[in-house]
Structures are given as structure tokens and as C-alpha cells.
Amino acid sequence: MIDIFELARTGGTVVGQLPLSAERLRASLRLASGALDFCLHGRVDELGRPSARLSIRGELPLTCDRCGGPLDLRVEQENTFYFVREESELAGLPVSADAESEPLLGSDRFDVAALVEDETILCIPVSPRHEVCLAPTDGAVSRRTSQVQNPFAALPGLLRDKQ
């Protein structure tokens, strides 16, 4: 926990690692070992607001939804945030998808690890897939395709039984 306003005022930097075993992150991962590197650099932006630039680097061990094999997603994420002191101020800000920086509620006990975990989760695709899948590593695709049958295939047999 840090004072985010003091970090911005002094231009300080927080460097660390987020373990892949972090509670919310690990639910999306194939393995929960390793860590992501992050750097949060505080500053005052051109509008005089306390802000910070967050950089996240590392690899996320995912599972390909297509072939079931391991998929390592390279994360190189950078975001800029500015901080407000009151929740009412945050609620009154317009929502803009193309803004250069995102507003966040700041505090003197700001949880940097939670911010890094949130931003990392947002990097994970809804359905991670290789660009080109190789042969299935554990038979996942062949098992899946052999179980898929035409739902109408049993109708002729049912009709014969009724007659």
C-alpha cells in the first residue's frame, strides 16, 4: 500500500513483481508459478492532476481454447492513470474510451498489486488461441470432434421403433 498522491507529487517509482498465483489472476492461468514485472511511475500530468504510468511485462501461461495445448501470452502493457480524491468526483467524470489516461480513485493506502492484477486480467483474451494450432497434445481436439454427432442421426431409429 502506498500514498498514490505522494508518489505522483514526488515523481516516485514503485517497481515489483506480481506473482501469477495472485488470487483472481490464477483462475485464468494454466500454471500459477512465476511472476510479472511491473513499474508504476508517479507524475503530475499536463493538467496538474496526480497521475502515474503503469508498465507490465511478462508471460502468462494460458491454455488454447482450440487445441487444448499450452499457450504463452506475452504481456507488454502500458497505461496511464490520473487520480481523484473523492468517489463523487470519479462518478461525475465523463466516460471516454479514447482518453489518454483513465481516472481512478486514489488514496493514501493505494493497492498497487490490485491495480497490476486488474490490468493483467484485462489483457487476457476471452478465448485464447494459437494463431495456428499444431496437432493436439493430449487428444483434446480428436476427443471433442468424435463426441460431436449430428443431433438428428438418431431420428430414423426412433421412427422405426414407433412403427
Image (cartoon, rainbow, N blue to C red):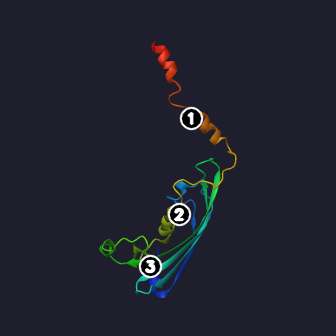
The amino acid beneath tag 3 is Ile
Q: Nearer the viewer, residue 100 or 42?
A: 100
Q: Nearer the viewer, mark 3 or mark 2?
A: 2
The residue carrying mark 3 is 4
Q: CA distance from mark 1 to mark 3?
A: 53 Å
Q: Name the spot of residue 69 as percent of width and height, x first.
A: 65, 49
Give the residue drawn at x 66%, y 53%.
Answer: 132
Label 1 with label 3: CB-CB less than 8 Å: no
Q: Earlier in the sequence, mark 1 or mark 2?
A: 2
Q: Amino acid at mark 1?
A: Val
Q: Quadrant of residue 78?
A: bottom right
Where in the figure is residue 150, as x and y percent of width and height?
54, 31
Between the residue at mark 1 and the residue at mark 2, the CA separation in whole angstroms equals 32 Å
- SS class, disc 1: loop
Residue 13 image offset from top left, x and y in percent? 54, 81
Residue under the image location 58 percent in, 49 percent down: 65
Residue furthest out toward the top: 163
Q: Could you say which disc has been placed on residue 123 in the image?
A: 2
Q: Is residue 156 above or below residue 33?
A: above
The residue wearing badge 1 is 148
Count residues near mark 3 (Cα–Cα under 10 Å), then give few for <14, some for 14-19, many for 20+. Answer: many
Q: Spatial distance from mark 3 to mark 2, Cα to Cα?
A: 23 Å
